Amino acid sequence: MSPLFTWPSLSVKDRIKAVKMLVWLGALLPILRLVYLGVTNDLGANPVEFIERSTGTWALVFLLLSLSVTPLKSLTRLGWLIAVRRLLGLWMFAYVSLHVTSYVWLDYQFDWSDMVKDIVKHPYVLVGALALLLTVPLAATSNQAAMHALKQRWKTLHQLVYVIAVLALLHFWWLVKKDLTEPIIYSGVFGLIMLLRLPVFSRK
Amino acid sequence: AQTLEFQKTAYGKEETLTALQDVTNYNNYYEFGTGKEDPAREAVLFKPTPWTIKIEGAVKQAKTIGIEQLMKLAPLEERIYRMRCVEGWSMVIPWIGLPLKALIDWAQPTGNAKYIEFVSYNDPRHMPGARMPILDWPYVEGLRMDEAMQPLTILAVGLYGKVLPNQNGAPVRLVVPWKYGFKGAKAISTIRFVEQMPTTTWMRASPREYGFYANVNPQVDHPRWTQSSEKRIGAGLFAGRVKTKLFNGYEEVASLYAGMDLKKNF
């Protein structure tokens, strides 16, 4: 266990702060990398594809990270871990936004009719677009005010995250031409996270 | 790499060439891995010489031809062609090669030869991708006889004035500029004249997605990728897309498909 979690002199508040800072640093790094590679003209032969791939991958990573908070909390009995879940979810939304921006702007240059055709005709784009749509209400209701206003319905609404995860993984499976290694790995991690939610693993 | 002697031609002289760096570092060559940059890295130790190609099937006599002899069948020419990948990107490449027709004439096919099958070299020991069941190895491609004889169809042995880099299909590959890039079998080891339409590797992998003809056609969509437009490699981050043309703009091949339903024969 990392000292961050167990260091006795650290108050819970400070631990939360420290973990949040780590999340911020970790989340900014991929963006800084893209900016650096862009400025140094090092994004490869197909820079648009590179940016789409990278932002899409990181959106998926933050989605899986946010889903892993609850099982991790049960396993470690560190209840305060829940405090970083929202931040992880919002970073997922940030990467989804960058992913979509690169598609709309860099890839399709705001050619809406071509984009509609692309979405309707290609299943992998369609499920990606659905996943995107579903992230919007979750991001919009991620604040305290919405939580209080929605009460029990907030929890129900935010269970959409599982639907988003399945759609996002499908988006990845159907996009890949032949080598399924990466989608298999991400789906495996998702499966593991779901498995850890079984009562056997959650010590209350 | 070794410099080649060749004649300039008028093909594509108005085109802006894709940078050599991009032509040699953004490749689909699954025998060397599925990443676009895998072939450049993994094919470094590949030995394209000595090299012989087996000529078999419906020919007067089965025989082999060495790469040096092949390069003397006709004067080498520079052909600047657009290359459109089925994934929705394109390049402009100055190939060095000779018309496939020159080899066909030398091979002396019989009247039973209706199609040609191209088999790519496959060596799991030296090709990391070939050790994985990504595709049904070896890689097989094919052309109808009249497509193969079309003057645009070439066997490329070089690009940018030099011997073909390993990651681009050394020592010899097929280039058919009005078809999607995957038709261009790399590192050809066998050329077989056959009577029946060959089942190509991609047809076997996904018959719904890949047909035998694979002509560039903005009207025939692919289940995964938009075919009405394409991204030109090297055009930059903000260049957007260009509209894809039927037969990749090589209209002279249209007569090969007169009366054919291109939506069915995709």
Image: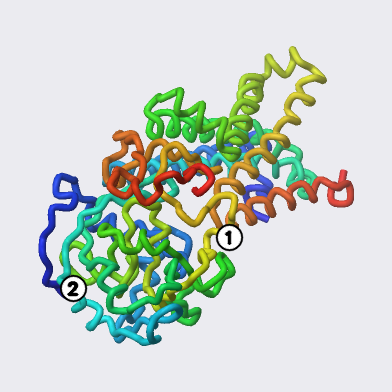
Q: Residue at x 29, y 85 (%)?
A: B66
Q: Residue at x 38, y 37 (%)?
A: B229
Identify the chain of the residue marked 1, using the numbered disc in the image.
B
| Residue at the front extreme of this rendering | B111
Going by the numbered disc 2, the residue's amino acid type is: Ala
Disc 1 crowd rating (10 Å Cα; few below 14, some 14-19, many 20+) is some
Q: Secondary structure at mark 1?
A: helix
Going by the numbered disc 1, the residue's amino acid type is: Ala
Task: Determine which quarter of the picture holds residue B219.
Answer: top left
Numbered label attached to residue B74:
2
Identify the chain of the residue marked 2, using the numbered disc in the image.
B
Residue B160 image position (x, y, % from top left): 18, 62
User: Does residue B17 appear in the picture of this structure?
Assistant: yes
Q: Residue at x 46, y 23 (%)?
A: A113
Residue A180 image position (x, y, % from top left): 59, 57
Give above or below for B108 relative to B241.
Answer: below
Real-space Cα distance between discs 1 and 2? 35 Å
Disc 2 crowd rating (10 Å Cα; few below 14, some 14-19, many 20+) is some
The mark nearer the N terminus, 1 or 2, is 2
Q: Secondary structure at mark 2?
A: loop
Please report contact status of discs 1 and 2: CB closer than 8 Å, yes or no: no
Q: Residue at x 84, y 51 (%)?
A: A201
Give above or below for A129 relative to A124.
Answer: above
Q: Assign the N terminus of chain A to one quadrant of the image.
A: bottom right
Give above or below for B213 relative to A130.
Answer: below
Disc tally is: 2
B210 or A115, nearer to the observer: B210
Numbered label attached to residue B205:
1
A85 or B26, nearer to the observer: B26
User: Does residue A18 appear in the picture of this structure?
Assistant: no
